[in-house]
Image: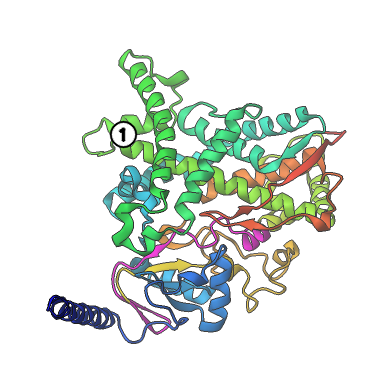
């Protein structure tokens, strides 16, 4: 009788559970239009998660060749659309930019409420527009960039001096570039160098920034199954929060000191030359600003993380490709020798006269975009793309890595050929207007620091080529250089580049 009684209770409960699951499936189907973009079949619960692998940008590019440039995926409980062609990217980021400009926020970024105040992750709203205006006015306008030329020149000189003092020891190119760019950013914002080339702080700071980028970019169960997010099963949000806290503690110390200086009347700021922190603190005292300390710290945090990592990664890839093909390095040096010579330093005004150097940077960004999938977008309303329905709140992934290697656009797309940009493609640029090459995105979500980053990378690259003759360590042949990559929010070299620099005897 007891077994019968238990069965009488169990079977109705099981039947009710099945009915609920069926109703949920039917409801889910009814919420999504029938003309979604095509995509691979997905398994229950996991969807298409298993096909992503360690290098999602490559896996998604392979799937796009089968299912098309606008492709649907089921990532756990999240519906995503992947865009992998210039024409589809143009339609989304130009023709329908307002529908595709919201941001899909990873669970890690919600630590410390960063997503609510961050320029990179906040939805386009009044606060977001205010922060972008601040950046454009005080950092990235042409007058502001021209006014800060001497600072960039000084930081590159510090880089060259550091390499010379190594006196033939191997140079960790990515780390040296990282220190240079990070000190440029910290000097601009805070009037200090936060790292020293020769101290352990450089390695520690790079690991800190790389940890932030890695936790934000790696696959996370919490992103694909939001109901599980409060448990943080992989611990990514906790680690992200710990990294953030270390930087926030540093920023708090600097802000407190600056406020004390202001209180005692010392902040006429060194010869009336305010840095970005001075500007932000002054604005925060205005009633109309709504610029809290948390917003200021997140504002600086975004600039530190995004600017230093992407710029140093791009320079490292460029140097790796030139060392991989010594004839290209020789060609770049010959151009600099002919146009500038070795008796004076390269200036930013010289870069426009170095078309091959510019082509090297374009080709590097085509093959190795620093953010191969950009930051994920989200649709703010139901829309249409390539004739397919894209529901509201769909995660949108722009595979700019695949766009840069599309064989319908690029001849020999997997080969590093800078000369391709010196012929018919010479006018192709990477600033968001030519959708064959959008490593920094386009539209209202285009990277706001693009102009500063490009100026700095070009100047560093030209100066390193002019100041030194470069070779790989004796045990590494150019053709054997390891160009494998490691995926995170940015894609870095799996084996960091190490090279030997011999100072140019004339320079």
Residue 150 can be seen, yes or no: no
- Quick one: label 1, few (<14), some, or many (20+) residues within 10 Å? some
Q: Which residues are magenta?
A: 362-390
Is 383 drawn above or below residue 158 in the view shown? below
Residue at the extreme front:
1
Q: Nearer the viewer, residue 11 or 140?
A: 11
| Quadrant of the image occupied by residue 390 | bottom left
| Quarter that holds the C terminus | top right
Residue position marked by numbered label 1 in the rendering: 293
Is 244 drawn above or below residue 443 in the view shown? above
Residue at the extreme bottom:
34
Picture coordinates of residue 418, whole percent (x, y): 73, 61
Magenta span has 385?
yes
| Quadrant of the image occupied by residue 490 | bottom right
Secondary element at tag 1: helix
| Quarter that holds the N terminus | bottom left
Q: Nearer the viewer, residue 387 or 354?
A: 387
The residue lying at 67 percent from left, 61 percent from top is: 363
The residue lying at 29 percent from left, 48 percent from top is: 127
């Amino acid at each position: 009788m007891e077994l019968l009684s238990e069965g009488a209770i169990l079977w109705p409960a099981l039947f009710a559970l099945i009915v609920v699951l069926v109703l949920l499936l039917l409801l889910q189907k009814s919420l999504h239009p029938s003309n979604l973009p095509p995509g691979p079949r997905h398994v229950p619960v996991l969807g298409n998660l298993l096909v992503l692998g360690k290098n999602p940008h490559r896996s998604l590019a392979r799937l796009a060749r089968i299912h098309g440039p606008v492709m649907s995926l089921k990532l756990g409980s999240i519906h995503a659309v992947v865009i992998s062609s210039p024409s589809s990217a143009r339609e989304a980021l130009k023709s329908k930019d307002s529908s595709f400009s919201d941001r899909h926020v990873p669970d890690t970024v919600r630590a410390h409420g960063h997503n609510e105040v961050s320029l990179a992750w906040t939805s386009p709203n009044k606060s977001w527009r205010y922060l972008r205006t601040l950046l454009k006015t005080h950092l990235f306008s042409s007058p502001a960039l021209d006014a800060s030329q001497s600072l960039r020149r000084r930081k590159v000189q510090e880089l060259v001096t550091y390499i010379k003092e190594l006196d033939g020891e191997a140079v960790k190119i990515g780390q040296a570039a990282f220190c240079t760019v990070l000190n440029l950013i910290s000097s601009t914002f805070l009037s200090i160098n936060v790292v020293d080339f020769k101290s352990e702080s450089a390695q520690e700071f790079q690991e800190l920034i790389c940890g932030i980028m890695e936790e934000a970019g790696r696959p996370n169960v919490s992103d694909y199954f939001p109901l599980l997010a409060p448990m943080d099963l992989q611990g990514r949000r906790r680690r992200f929060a710990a990294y953030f806290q270390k930087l926030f503690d540093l920023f708090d110390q600097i802000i407190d000191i600056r406020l004390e200086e202001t209180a005692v009347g010392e902040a006429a700021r060194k010869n009336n030359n305010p840095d970005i922190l001075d500007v932000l603190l002054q604005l925060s005292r205005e009633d109309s600003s709504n610029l809290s300390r948390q917003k200021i710290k997140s504002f600086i945090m975004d600039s530190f993380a995004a600017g230093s990592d992407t710029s140093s990664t791009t320079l490292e890839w460029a140097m790796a490709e030139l060392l991989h093909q010594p004839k290209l390095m020789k060609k770049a040096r010959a151009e600099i020798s002919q146009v500038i010579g070795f008796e004076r330093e390269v200036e930013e005004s010289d870069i426009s006269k170095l078309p091959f150097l510019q082509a090297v940077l374009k080709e590097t960004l085509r093959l190795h975009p620093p953010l191969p999938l950009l930051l994920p977008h989200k649709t703010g309303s139901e829309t249409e793309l390539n004739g397919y329905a894209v529901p509201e709140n769909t995660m949108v992934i722009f595979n700019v890595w695949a766009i840069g290697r599309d064989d319908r656009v690029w001849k020999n797309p997997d080969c590093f050929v800078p000369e391709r940009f010196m012929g018919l493609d010479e006018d192709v640029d990477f600033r968001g207007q030519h959708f064959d090459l959008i490593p920094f995105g386009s539209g209202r979500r285009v990277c706001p620091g693009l102009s500063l980053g490009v100026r700095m990378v070009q100047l560093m690259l030209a100066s390193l080529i002019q100041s030194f003759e470069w070779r790989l360590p004796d045990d590494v042949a150019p053709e054997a250089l390891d160009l494998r990559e490691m995926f995170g929010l940015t894609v870095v070299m799996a084996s960091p580049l190490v090279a030997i620099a011999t100072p140019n005897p004339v320079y």
